[in-house]
Amino acid sequence: MPTSAELHQRRSAAVARGVSSMIPSYVSSAGGGTMTDVDGREWIDFAAGIAVTSVGNSAPAVVSAVQEQVAKFTHTCFMIAPYEQYVAVCEELAVLTPGSFEKRSALFNSGAEAVENAVKIARHATGRQAVVVFDHAYHGRTNLTMALTSKVMPYKQGFGPFAGEIYRVPMSYPFRDGLSGTEAAALAIGLVEKQVGAANLAAVLIEPIQGEGGFVVPAPGFLAELAAWTRSTGAVFIADEIQTGFCRTGSWFACTDEGVEPDLITTAKGIAGGLPLAGVTGRAEIMDAVHPGGLGGTYGGNPVACAAALATIGMMRELDLAAAARRIESVARPRLEALAAKHPMIGEVRGRGAMLALELVKPGESGPFGPASDPVAAAAVAKAAHEAGLLLLTCGTWGNVIRLLPPLIISDDELDRGLTLLEQAFNQEETPS
Ligand SMILES: *Cc1c(COP(=O)(O)O)cnc(C)c1O
């Protein structure tokens, strides 16, 4: 087997520079809460491929479902010759997503594609164009989703012009705005009323807990007030649960924790154990507003990906991975809080379930956005963690947030080892070398 160094050389001559990787090591296998690279080094996985492999890599139930399906047929295109697996995934989505109303779903390949389609559906159903999104939002890298995404570097720089009729308003960000959910909702709604006009509004699109934007958890009530107001204008409330969904936050969907029933909900990441699948699910009258043939794509709802999703959902149900996410929080949060008590650079510990974050600041300094961010410290901690064998991601508009996204099936021992490596990375960062 070639070494990582050899593969890196080949990569430099063959792979576009714009596609980058966090670590210089190449994977040979992964499973449970660990990954092994081609040089034989083992890593603790606190990334899960960005909240994707919640059931673990190569989970046996997913592997056998995929193998069985791949041996039967790999692709017919649902738009040509349909198959049961697609229908069964849509049936599951109707049951699992919040709201007991009649629902329909459509399946796609990636999160960005699901978000694009949710916007298409909302515009078609309302006959309106304006879409409201939030500061720090991340919705993808395609043309429409770049417009919906907040951060310019690296996601948007040089890639314009962007799609029109997208309006951005402040996100509830308690650590930085100090507002209650009601106050933050009133601010956002007031801006939309004056600067967009409720009558022009097709949709309000929001991540119930922001992902790439920094694991920002809105103040309680913010989502519910926004959803109720959106509905009162005749617009569509879309929850982007691509990162938060499928048990990550300790419920099947994060909106449930806030008692919110979105009109449309986008899913991807954790849905299929690592195979590419995404969905838009929502109120039947909104979803069915689109004419036959208006939605689709060659690979959308590929049968192998659908088989993987059915096995993944089965595992989540049998093993109660929502409870597993809550258990991960109950182990990790006290340790993160103890770490924060020791290191003043940790400005806040936040998140829910197995979606936890540390926001790093320069103690005692503040600026126009509240506490001064410390992206240099976040990068240094992540680097120290990587050197010690812990896969750890950063995020946030200022790049100063360390995020934990372990697979939900991680063992107690692996979780403990990962947290110990994280603690050591902080200790190392604060000891001048
Ligand atoms: C990852 C992500 C997307 C984009 O999904 P892709 O599969 O990368 O296109 C959209 N929204 C949220 C909230 C995400 O976390």
Image: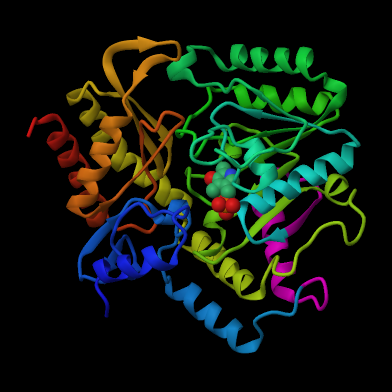
Name the residue at the left extreme.
433
Looking at the picture, tell me which residue is in the foreground, 324 or 121: 121
Residue 164 left/right relative to 389: right
Height in image: 195 above or below 343?
Answer: above
What range of the chain is rendered magenta?
78-106
Residue 23 x, y percent position in the rendering? 31, 55
Q: Residue at x 27, y 71 (%)?
A: 6
Residue 146 left/right relative to 354: right
* Residue 222 sits inside the magenta stretch: no
Residue 263 x, y percent position in the rendering? 76, 40
Q: Residue at x 50, y 39 (%)?
A: 211
Residue 57 left/right relative to 34: right
* Residue 94 sits inside the magenta stretch: yes
Residue 17 x, y percent position in the rendering? 44, 55
Looking at the picture, tell me which residue is in the foreground, 338 or 170: 170
Name the residue at the front extreme.
13
Q: Residue at x 20, y 44 (%)?
A: 384
